[in-house]
Amino acid sequence: MDDPALDDDSADDTAPPASGKRALADDREPDGPNRRCILSRAVRRRDAMLRFVVAPDGLVVPDLDARLPGRGLWLSPGRDVVETAAAKGVFARAAKRAVVLPPDLAERVDRLLEERCIDLVGLARKAGQAVAGFEKVKSWVHTGRAGMVLEAWDGSEGGRAKLGAETWGMPVFRAMDRLALGRAFAREQAVHAAVEPGGLARRLEADLIRLARLRGRLDGQTDAAGTDTKDADRKSGGPRSGHPAPRERDRRDRKTKPL
């Protein structure tokens, strides 16, 4: 039997009901970290999924911060997951009402996620927690300062290969192109970037995983949310490239090279 706490048929739990009485469990979103995809019914951590709400006029709106009021409609990240849910009327069935679907809903989610990633990298740069450029990134990786590496998916394969051995065991994301990554550093383009561990990096990682899944640009084993990326509802890629990095590691003493 499905766990009712994982079904997201509920109103938002950010505010008490107008009556002042506690809402019934069926009328609230669960407080736990997991949500169930309305298309595949697969369960993932909420920060690895996409939330949508239905506006008062019936328009389906992406809610990537998961803060808008109303019943949350959750989907596993994937362009064809969003498109299939729209084509098969899944949003209307889950919302139990007529809805209006923008024809470019998946593209809207893509743009919003990319802007979030650019903004977060920009914040990290301004805080001195991110650098761009091959030599700087290589230095940060070699000294253990980098918590993750970002590489433009349309960058030179040779440049990625040269840095590849250094980044073994570290999260490496190739969800954005050179122009998008460059915007984060207030330059025309960028191919290599590194971000220090910390709160900004954790938020960025969650959004990069969702963006990369949406774009089908992930190829690892397990993402930050602990989700096996080979499950049935993964219709658009897996997690970040590279291998999961243990918290306690000394990159400078690594001897093993990736196959």
Image (cartoon, rainbow, N blue to C red):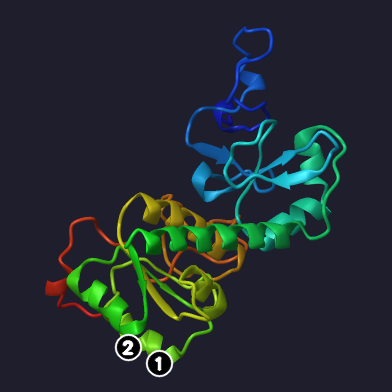
Q: Where does residue 1 sit, x and y in percent of width and height?
A: 58, 29
Q: Say what secondary structure mark 2 lies in.
A: helix
Which residue appears at 78% of the width and 37% of the height? 55
Label 2 neighbourhood size at 10 Å, few (<14), some (14-19), many (20+)?
A: few
Label 1 neighbourhood size at 10 Å, few (<14), some (14-19), many (20+)?
A: few
Quarter occupied by residue 53 = top right
The answer to whether 66 is drawn above or below residue 242 in the figure is above
The answer to whether 139 is drawn above or below residue 87 in the figure is below
Taking the image as shown, residue 55 lies to the left or right of residue 209, namely: right
Residues at discs 1 and 2 in contact (Cβ within 8 Å): yes
Confirm whether residue 230 shows in the render.
no
Q: Where does residue 186 sit, x and y in percent of width and height?
A: 49, 72
Please give the label number shown on residue 12: none
Confirm whether residue 175 shows in the render.
yes
The residue indicated by pointer 2 is 162
The answer to whether 217 is drawn above or below residue 227 in the figure is below
Q: Where does residue 163 sit, x and y in percent of width and height?
A: 32, 83
198 and 84: which one is in front? 198
Which residue appears at 57% of the width and 44% of the height? 65
Which kind of residue does numbered mark 2 sit on? Lys
The answer to whether 71 is drawn above or below residue 21 in the figure is below
Q: Where does residue 28 sit, x and y in percent of width and height?
A: 62, 23
Which residue appears at 30% of the width and 57% of the height? 197
Q: Residue furthest left?
A: 253
Which residue appears at 79% of the width and 52% of the height? 86
Quarter occupied by residue 106 = bottom right
Which kind of residue does numbered mark 1 sit on? Gly
The residue indicated by pointer 1 is 158
210 and 15: which one is in front? 15
Taking the image as shown, residue 148 lies to the left or right of residue 61, namely: left
Marks 1 and 2 sit apart, C-alpha to C-alpha, by 6 Å
